């Protein structure tokens, strides 16, 4: 049950453009426009705008191809939803959360405060994280569009402020699940700061993925009913009402109820995240247990047929539409797209993450490696590079650490007492997930290089 272009085209007239009220259109503006530009755009396009000056540009709508051209979207292979307690994908790379994981021989770490304190952010409001100007940044620092509106977006759009689902019924570009790169970090910092940062970040990503994946299950369920009458537009009609919020947003409550099953012993913290969402989203607990969930499925199926949300309106076959055997579930894979902000959002040193799309070993680094004349060291170096390139296959890089200088990281090829002299190499991000390795060497030279370049 993998949706491909042929199946999408077979939907014929049942395919449609995303409604104007879909959150993806708002996310597109936040990704591409500054805060001031968004406010001006909204003023000019507001229905009550009586100004003689009319907008001379088309409304900004969701456009995957435009994001791809700008290097702001990274598409992964389609993924399925694992059963709760089963295998869950590792999404990102992390720096260790404990000072014990760092190399004690580094001179600048002798009097370093425990790194764990950098992750212990106790914020009462998510805006405090997003609106606080990073230390060392001038007052005229241009805040990105996500920073100020995100708090309001969470209140209005719930989980869809951080991740969203483009249905395969859409006539536009790539369908699938879109997750903002910064989203897991925000959730982990505010709601999961008491657990291991690596686990916190992966749990946050899994919760968002599971929530959005339910929207795919919902689309499949509605399409199944629609197939009984090919001339019907059940999903289009239901989707329009869902986006316009003319009905109770039952699907969002069920999506959160399903996602909560992936809390991995952190249910209280995940519920705190969900409780701050808007109407419908925060009613997930009413449908968390089996009997209540079955009732919700029946109500949702009746809404597919055009009925309003009601405790009395239930499709008696609705519950069966959502029960998917595991051997079928594993084939229901959905494309996943990670979305990067046009201007990086600075969250300090909290839960840093790394994505390696491409790693380039510079000629200078290759020359230094040959000059060292150590074939074992060369083998370790290229093995480490291959490991970083295979990010999706590993849990985290224990030897990768963030430097003080933005976009610079170091990788430890050896430990204290290593026969090869505690070798290191540096990585620097050149943009759009492309990294360069400018230098590789043993520890004495590494210390001088780091001091010279303020790393």
Image (tube, grey):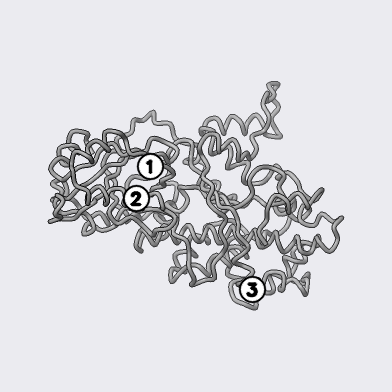
Q: What quarter of the picture does the C terminus occupy? A: top left
Residue 348 is situated, as x and y percent measured from the top left of the image, at 34, 45
Q: Tag 3: Cα neighbours inside 10 Å, few (<14), some, or many (≥20)?
A: few
* Cα–Cα gap, marks 2 and 1: 24 Å
Kindly check if marks 3 and 1 are in contact, taking CB atoms under 8 A apart as contact.
no
Q: Which mark is residue 101?
A: none
Residue 63 is situated, as x and y percent measured from the top left of the image, at 62, 38
Residue position for label 3: 325
Name above or below for residue 238 compared with residue 153: below
Residue 75 vs residue 40, the one in the foreground: 75
Q: Which residue lies at the image location 76% right of the left edge and 64% below the top edge?
A: 224
Q: Earlier in the sequence, mark 3 or mark 1?
A: 3
Residue 27 is situated, as x and y percent measured from the top left of the image, at 57, 42
Q: Earlier in the sequence, mark 3 or mark 2?
A: 3
Q: Tag 2: Cα neighbours inside 10 Å, few (<14), some, or many (≥20)?
A: many
Name above or below for residue 368 compared with residue 352: above
* Cα–Cα gap, marks 3 and 1: 40 Å
Residue 202 is situated, as x and y percent measured from the top left of the image, at 43, 59
Q: Which residue lies at the image location 58% right of the left edge and 37% below the top edge?
A: 29
Q: Which residue lies at the image location 45% right of the left edge and 70% below the top edge?
A: 264
Q: Can residue 154 be seen in the rendering of this structure?
A: no
Q: Can residue 44 be seen in the rendering of this structure?
A: yes
Which SS class for mark 3?
Answer: loop
Q: What quarter of the picture does the N terminus occupy? A: bottom right
Residue position for label 2: 350
Q: Earlier in the sequence, mark 2 or mark 1?
A: 2
Residue position for label 1: 359
Which SS class for mark 1?
Answer: strand
* Cα–Cα gap, marks 3 and 2: 39 Å
């Amino acid at each position: 049950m993998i949706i491909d272009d042929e199946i999408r085209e077979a939907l014929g007239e049942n395919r449609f453009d995303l409604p104007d009220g879909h959150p993806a259109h708002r996310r597109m503006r936040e990704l591409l426009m500054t805060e001031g530009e968004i406010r001006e755009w909204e003023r000019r396009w507001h229905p009550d705008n009586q100004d003689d000056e009319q907008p001379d540009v088309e409304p900004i709508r969701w456009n995957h191809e435009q994001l791809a051209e700008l290097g702001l979207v990274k598409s992964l292979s389609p993924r399925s939803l694992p059963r709760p307690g089963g295998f869950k994908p590792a999404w990102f790379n992390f720096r260790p959360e404990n000072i014990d994981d760092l190399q004690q021989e580094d001179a600048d770490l002798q009097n370093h405060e425990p790194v764990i304190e950098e992750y212990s952010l106790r914020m009462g409001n998510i805006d405090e994280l997003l609106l606080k100007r990073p230390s060392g940044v001038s007052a005229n620092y241009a805040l990105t569009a996500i920073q100020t509106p995100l708090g309001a977006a969470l209140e209005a759009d719930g989980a869809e402020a951080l991740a969203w689902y483009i249905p395969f019924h859409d006539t536009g570009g790539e369908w699938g699940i879109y997750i903002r790169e910064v989203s897991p970090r925000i959730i982990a910092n505010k709601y999961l700061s008491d657990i291991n940062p690596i686990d916190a970040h992966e749990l946050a990503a899994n919760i968002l993925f599971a929530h959005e994946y339910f929207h795919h299950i919902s689309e499949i369920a509605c399409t199944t009913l629609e197939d009984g009458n090919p001339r019907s537009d059940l999903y289009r009609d239901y989707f329009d009402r869902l986006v316009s919020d003319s009905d109770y947003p039952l699907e969002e409550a069920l999506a959160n109820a399903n996602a909560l099953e992936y809390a991995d012993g952190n249910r209280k913290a995940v519920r705190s995240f969900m409780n701050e969402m808007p109407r419908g989203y925060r009613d997930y607990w009413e449908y968390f247990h089996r009997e209540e969930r079955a009732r919700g499925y029946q109500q949702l199926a009746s809404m597919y047929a055009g009925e309003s949300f009601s405790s009395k309106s239930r499709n008696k076959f609705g519950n069966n539409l959502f029960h998917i055997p595991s051997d079928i579930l594993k084939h229901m894979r959905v494309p996943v797209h990670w979305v990067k902000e046009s201007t990086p959002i600075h969250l300090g040193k909290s839960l840093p993450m790394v994505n390696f799309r491409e790693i380039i070993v510079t000629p200078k680094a290759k020359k230094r490696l040959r000059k060292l004349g150590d074939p074992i060291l060369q083998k370790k170096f290229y093995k480490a590079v291959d490991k970083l390139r295979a990010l999706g296959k590993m849990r985290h890089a224990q030897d990768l650490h963030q430097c003080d200088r933005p976009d610079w990281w170091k990788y430890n090829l050896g430990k204290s007492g290593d026969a090869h002299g505690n070798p290191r190499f540096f990585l620097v991000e050149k943009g759009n997930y492309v990294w360069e390795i400018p230098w590789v060497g043993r520890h004495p030279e590494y210390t001088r290089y780091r001091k010279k370049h303020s790393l």
